[in-house]
Image (cartoon, helix red, strand yellow):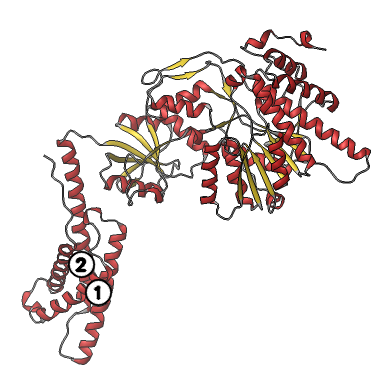
Amino acid sequence: MHYKIRILPRWLIFILDLVCVLFSIFFSFVLRFNFNLEDVATYNMSLILSVALLLNASLFYLLKSYAGIIRYTNIEDTFRLLIVNSIAAIFYFSINFIVSYSFSSILLFPISVVVINFFITNFVVITYRLLVRYCFRYYQMHQKGSEGVVAKKAAVYDTSEHGLQTKKVINDFQSGITVVAFLDEALSRTGKLMEGIPIYNTDEQSLKKLKAEGVELLIIANRKIAKDKLNRLVDTCLHVGIKVQQVPPVQEWLNGKLDTQQLKDINIEDLLEREVIRIQNEKIHFELKGKKILVTGAAGSIGSELVRQLCGYRPTLIILCDKAETPMHDLYLEIKDNYPKTNIKAYIGDICDHVRMEHLFEIYNPDVVFHAAAYKHVPLMEDNPSVAVLNNVLGTKILAELSVEYGVEKFVMVSTDKAVNPTNIMGATKRIAEIFTQSFYTNLLKDIEALNKGARPTKFVTTRFGNVLGSNGSVIPRFKQQLSQGGPITVTHPEITRYFMTIPEACQLVIEAGVMGQGNEIFVFDMGEPVKIIDLAKKIIKLAGKEPDVDIKIVYSGLRPGEKLYEELLNLSENVQPTYHDKIMIAKVQEYDFGYVKEKVEKLIASAKQHYTLETVGQMKELVPEFVSANSIYGSIKIDKLSD
């Protein structure tokens, strides 16, 4: 039967501490006079004990040394007791000086007794607390054993204050976990003990030894661990069969407690196998401060993060444009709550509605446009090519023309790596949008030069990057949803690979491109090494403490219509030139005559408005010759059959 140990009332601890003090005072006299009670009797012990009782009772009450829960005594509690006893010793000296000065025949506290008493009192009051703590922990382990409950053995990574605090909290509370080892990369600490617990190295041999000793869990206590170290450590742990979790920030601990439910699984986003591109460009603040900024697709995963980051640059106004009402409402409330000083306007509108967009530009006259609105789901766009053209091409055309008409300084378009050698409708529409904005800008420059005007037109800048982790419809949320349902996890092909970056990083680069760009550039980013989706799926399963194809099945569903095995950031015919940042480059793409592009785009849009599927796709292939449909019904469409 399980009996719950009640916490002792404070008044009882208060009395126990006073008893310890009185015992220590008396024993100090006995020890000072070599256990000769006749010599001790020469002192007025009744008066001495009364003074000590009154003095310590006052100090205990004022400094609340009795307020802590004994079974959870920690360094702070011990330090508080040392302070109390130090102050008491000072008072003993003072009382002895005053009394001996006033009454030369009376000596209450000999100096030798005060010194002896200081050490004895500290030893007694601290030791009895530690004994209670030890007995309580022993009782917990015995109780769990009698009930058949076996605490999970864990190791803590980090021997700094973070690791020590994590170990204390976990071991001191009924968390169902017992910390039996620390991990540290410093060889100088390996083999040593910290609070009686051994420190191991992070190599595979050490982790295999811990696994053999029954360690099931590694807890990452240091949240600032470098990404390469975290990747290496997690991979090694998963290889030997040790689950990895991470503690939440200390401020998120519930009432100072940490239990198994608060430990968080390592997010796959944290293990992105590349260093985050961090940009510190003071020019961003100068360019965006005090400006009116329009963000299209503001309610989407990229658009909403753009809005959050733009709030930090103190613009005069941010216009949130989207046609999705509920996500827009949620974002509006979030920005109002988290950035109360930022002036925002939620504008419900479809970028394909020319009248509505013109109304937006007339009222707010934005200085900078971040165009993130787009249809992006490859399979859906394969089934609805005309809608993809209208949203991704017509919408971009309307916004680009209005930006020039209303004197927008910069137009920054969010593109995709799927625009490179496109194999699907979505990628082809984004490439056409790139071609239109670039040729449009080139033509504007020619017109201005012909008219001998000094003013420069709207600068059009394009950013092109791969998949973002956690975006709406991306593979990671899909895998996590399938995992929570017990599987199976579906992967389209065993060889499919993708580039990845996080949403905040992608948006940071989009903002940077907007400032860096001087017009007509397509910025591409160093996305690191591509990741095989099957490896990503297996790692997600292992991070959840399960085994691929044992606990969670992985099935191959086959490539979807228009889907590539490998994504590309550059066309084979494209070259790049460096920028001030070694991870940001400018693609030198093929240039098009605007007259030709305008004619083809208008014809394409007219076909899309009639929702002529085959004709629309054929015209897309005529405008983008490198567009070759993959795993799609449009693969049989040939350009020459539809050429004029």
Question: Of the residues under marks 2 and 1, which one precedes in the sequence?
Answer: 1
Q: Which is nearer the eye, 34 or 618?
A: 618
Query: Which percent across, then down, holds residue 40?
Result: 9, 77
Reply above or below: 167 against 272.
below
Q: Are marks 2 and 1 in contact (CB under 8 Å)?
A: yes
Badge 1 amino acid = Ala
Query: Looking at the picture, which amino acid does disc 2 mark?
Result: Thr
| Residue where numbered disc 1 is placed | 88
Q: Residue 107 placed where, x, y %?
A: 17, 84
Q: Residues within 10 Å of mark 2 (few under 14, many from 20)?
A: many
Q: Dividing the picture into quarters, in which one does residue 146 lie?
A: top left
Residue 136: x %, y % from top left: 18, 49
Between 619 and 237, the one nearer to me in the picture: 619
Tell whether 509 sits left or right of 264.
Answer: right
Answer above or below: position of 578 versus 537. Answer: below
Q: Horizontally, is 358 left or right of 190 in the view?
A: right
Residue 366 in view of the camera: no
Query: Disc 2 or disc 1, which is closer to the eye?
Result: 1
Question: Which residue is found at the position 26% from the left and 82% from the top?
Answer: 94
